[in-house]
Amino acid sequence: MPYLVLLGAPGSGKGTQASVLAKALGVPHVASGDLLRAHVAQQTELGRMAHQYMTRGELVPDDVTIAMVMERLDQPDARQGAVLDGFPRTVAQAEALDARLAERGAGVDRALLLVVPDDELVRRLAGRWLCRQCGASYHEVSNPPRQPGRCDRCGGPLFQRDDDTPTVVRKRLAVFREQTLPLLDYYRRQGKLVEVDGVGEIAQVREALLAAALGTPA
Ligand code: AMP
C-alpha cells in the first residue's frame, strides 16, 4: 500500500481528491489542515498557537506540524500507507517525512501535483463551502449542494473557511509559491513527481490522479 503526497496550491482540489483517492486505495487521508483545524476547534494549546498563523495565511512552524503529522502516521491505520494532503509544505517537512517512513522500510511512492491556473484558484476559493461534519467540499457555482447550507453526503452544516477571504487567499498563494514550490524539485530529483491537470470535472481529475498514483498512463 502506498504513501502518496498530494501537492497543489490552495484551491487546486487537493482535499476533495485526496479523500477520494484514499478511499479508492484503502488508506487513510491525512490532511494537516484538518488536523490543525481540529486543534483550533478544541482550543488546545497547539490550536491556539497555530490559529494565529492560519488566519494570516502563513505556515505554522515546521516543528509543530511535523510532530503533529508524525503522531498521526504512527497510528495503526497509517502504518502501511496514507494519502498526505497539505503536508509536506516545506523541504524540511519532506525530509522529516522521508526519515520517519524509512524507519519502517517505506518511503513516499509518488508526489502528485494538481496543476490549476491562478485565476481559477481564486474563483474556486471564493465560492467554497465545506461540511463541518464530514469535510466534504462544495462550490456555490460549479458544485453546489442540493440544499443550500446542507451537506449532500451526511446532512451536516456547511461553512466558509475564515482564511478563504481574498486578502488571506492572496497571502496563501504567495506562501505556496515561495515555500512549497521548492518541494517540486525535491520530488522531481527523486523521480517521484507526476503532474496532473487539475482543471475539469471532479471525476475526470480523479481518474487522471488514480492513473498517476498507480503508474498507468492517464
Ligand atoms: P490547508 O487546509 O491545507 O489549506 O491548510 C490551512 C492552513 O493550515 C494553512 O494556510 C497553514 O496556515 C496551516 N497548515 C496546514 N498544513 C501545514 C503544513 N504542512 N505546514 C505549515 N502550515 C500548515
Image (cartoon, rainbow, N blue to C red):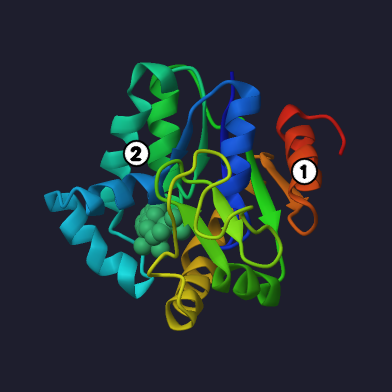
Q: Which mark is residue 170?
A: none
Residue type, numbered disc 1: Ala
Please give left or right for residue 18 compared with residue 33 in the image: right
- 76 is higher (above) or lower (below) than 14: above
User: Residue at horizontal 44%, vertical 45%?
Assistant: 156
Which image quarter has ligand 1? bottom left
**How many residues crowd mark 1 within 10 Å: few (<14), some (14–19), many (20+)?**
few
Q: Which residue is mark 2?
A: 69
Residue 129 at x, y = what percent? 52, 61
Judging depth in this view, the residue of 67 and 17 nearest the camera is: 17
User: Residue at horizontal 33%, vertical 34%?
Assistant: 70
Residue 136 at x, y = what percent? 53, 46
User: Residue at horizontal 63%, vertical 36%?
Assistant: 20
Judging depth in this view, the residue of 19 and 146 nearest the camera is: 146
Residue 164 at x, y = what percent? 46, 71
Please give left or right for residue 216 compared with residue 162 in the image: right
